[in-house]
Image (cartoon, rainbow, N blue to C red):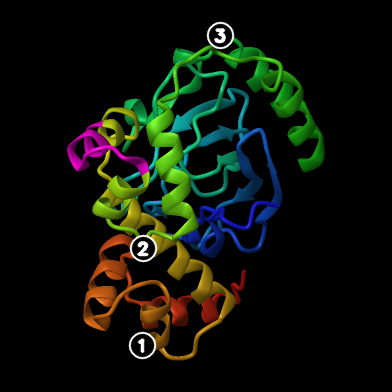
Amino acid sequence: MNNHLIRPIQPYFRIHTHKSYQAKYVNYDGISHFYSFVVDDSALAVNVVPDGSIDIIFKLHDDKPEAWICGSSRKLCNTLIERGCFYFGVRYQIGVMPTFLPLKPKDIIDQSIPLCIVYALAELLIEKISDCNDFEQKIRTFSQVCSKQQFLQHKPELSQTLIKLMLYHRGNISISELSHHSGYSARTISNSFNDYYGMSPKALNMTFRYQQSLKYLMEKKYERLTDLAACIGYSDQSHFLRQFKRYNGQGPKEFQSTLRKNLIQD
């Protein structure tokens, strides 16, 4: 297991589906985990938060199953997920684009597009997964269909190297430090990230820190928010509180209360 990875979390998927939510963490082929759920009937809109990752989500509720490829959001936003519908999803590691898709992460940032538009085997994949009887069978089917397919796309070596550094430092590395480690100028680094990921290194660093704070809150690792803020790299607690609420829609204390109310723990 690569301990430098940050597992991408979508907390409101858990909160609004906790009666049915299940996940399997695998860490292979760039995949973080598989998951499935039915949104609780009492749930309001299911928000998505910035996580730096890509999801493939299958809606398998009715006679016309569908699938979308969903890019990372740069801010808190609503999804098209519906109450009472059954969903199966695949979440990739932060910064990873599925090898069978001819896309860059920037092509789908802040977007959800039908999988059939970009993947020739989408209809076959959707049909096979909709025919599966259980969660484990869906996982095996996805892996069997998609692991054999690879699109020969260019992955910029610079961005791949630097994102590993950013993950290693949990988002606490400046662009000048990235420049020092790589030997490239700050402008070259910024251009490379924007061209491939669709966001700046600073924005991605902030996403990493937010995701790390989610992990710690869900693990109940820190009782005091001052300690949590310092741990994830904020010298100013008020800055941490503002940034967390901007990405999460709730401040840390309110979010902790929501987790307790729904008995959610990572």
Of the pair 119 and 38, the residue shown nearer to us = 119
- For label 1, the residue is 226
The crowd level at tag 1 (other Cα within 10 Å; few <14, some 14-19, many 20+) is some
Mark 2 vs mark 1, foreground winner is 2
Q: Is residue 113 visible?
A: yes
The crowd level at tag 2 (other Cα within 10 Å; few <14, some 14-19, many 20+) is some
Badge count: 3
The crowd level at tag 3 (other Cα within 10 Å; few <14, some 14-19, many 20+) is few
Q: Is residue 74 visible?
A: no
From the viewer's perspective, is residue 81 above or below residue 247?
above
- For label 3, the residue is 120
Which circle's residue, 3 or 1, is located before the other in the chain? Answer: 3
Name the residue type under label 3: Ala
Element carrying mark 3: loop
- For label 2, the residue is 172
Asked whether, in this view, residue 226 is left or right of residue 81, the answer is left
Q: Who's the residue at 58% across and 58% down the image?
A: 17
Element carrying mark 2: loop
Which circle's residue, 3 or 2, is located before the other in the chain? Answer: 3
